[in-house]
Image (tube, rainbow, N blue to C red):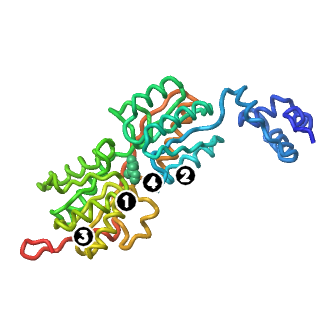
Amino acid sequence: MDKVTIKDIAREAGVSITTVSRVLNNKEEGMSNETREKVLRVIEKVNYQPNQLARSLVTKRSKMLGLIVPNISNPFFPELCRGAEDEANDHNYSLIICNSDDQLHKEENYLRLLKEQQVDGILLSSKDQLSETNKMQLRESKIPFIIFDRGEEGNQHSGVFLDNEKGGYLAGQHLIALGHTQIACITGPKNIHNSQKRLSGFQLALKEAALGLPEEFILTGDFKMDTAYQLAKEFLKNNRVTAIFACNDLMACGVYQAAHELGIRIPEQLSIIGFDDIPLITALIPKLTTIRQNTYEMGRKAIELLIHQIEHESSERVVFEPTLIVRESTKQINKVGGVDI
Ligand code: RIB
């Protein structure tokens, strides 16, 4: 059978080609419901597949968006993808998801590829700061873009972020309220802005309680489980702390593993607090206390901003609030004669 065209649908429904085109492009203002439904019935009956290529030549839109994430193996990012994909779908866009593997050259390649694919917009969660090449690529391609979670500098880009400093502060306050004074922190990479902010918020809470965080109690991690495991194992062998703040949940999992292997009981001998609230951690025993980022909703919001930027050439910066989720891995400390036990 010959390929069904928009002309055939118009003839069969007894309406003009413009009317069919308006239905296909969701521009039905002023059209009666009856007409719209008649056209949709014919489209369904003949199983019409619009020619996306031809369509994009006319509309100058591909209805495709690109999303670049730094590490798809970290469950935080699939959660972002879910939210982003759902929102894109609600607006009839499809999403190309690219994983840069924390490598700058892959990030730059994907930016090039997305330009070649003529995506209408890009949501970028960079490996850390935006590189000069990234910035030039984005500027020159003239494709609307939104930054997510990482890559912000001096609040100059539209995007979706978390108040990371507050997140670190909440973690510190929680441990202090439970009576902990000997606390260590496993940070994310030094060059990621959100990781620096989590640490400074945490330090602020400790400072307000007149507590210090000695340099040797700050362990530089990389947001990965295995590194945190190695760091925690070495550290806990030689130091006695009653609590650890791991700046993301995957690193908290690494601390669990180290504590388990060293025979340290959580939370009786060691309280642990994480950051992110990834779905996976509900399987941990004891259940992990953490700082929640509403990653799914943040992903949806980012795509909403991106589509707004595509359609109205204006966008904004949205900062989400973190929340403390108290579960079972943090515990009030007992003191006997002023000594932590
Ligand atoms: O777990 C991955 C971390 O990297 C998250 O905390 C997120 O905010 C990101 O930058």
Disc 3, SS = loop
Mark number, residue 82:
2
Q: Could you say whether the residue bearing mark 4 is in a helix, strand or loop? A: helix
Residue 273 in percent (x, y) is at 30, 62
Q: Closer to the N terminus: mark 2 or mark 1? A: 2
The image shows residue 198 at horizontal and vertical percentages of: 29, 49
Q: Which mark is residue 76?
A: 4
Q: Marks 2 and 4, Cα distance to the nearest angstrom?
A: 10 Å
Counting residues from the N terminus, which is met first, the one under dot 1 or under dot 3? Answer: 1
Q: Is residue 67 above or below residue 144?
A: below
Q: Earlier in the sequence, mark 3 or mark 4?
A: 4
Placement of the N terminus among the 4 image quadrants: top right
Type of the residue with mark 3: Leu
**Looking at the image, which residue is at 34% across and 34% down?**
153
- Between residues 4 and 318, which one lies in front from this camera angle? 4
Say which mark, if any, is on residue 206: none
94 lies left or right of 83 = right
Q: CA distance from mark 1 to mark 3?
A: 18 Å
Give the residue type that dot 2 points to.
Arg
Marks 2/1: CA–CA distance: 22 Å
Of residue 40 and residue 329, the one placed in the foreground of this image is 329
The residue to which callout 1 is attached is 225
Q: CA distance from mark 3 to mark 4?
A: 25 Å
Q: Label 3, on which residue?
A: 270
Look at discs 1 and 3 and give the one toward the viewer. 1
* SS for callout 2: helix
**Label 1 close to label 4 by CB (< 8 Å):** no
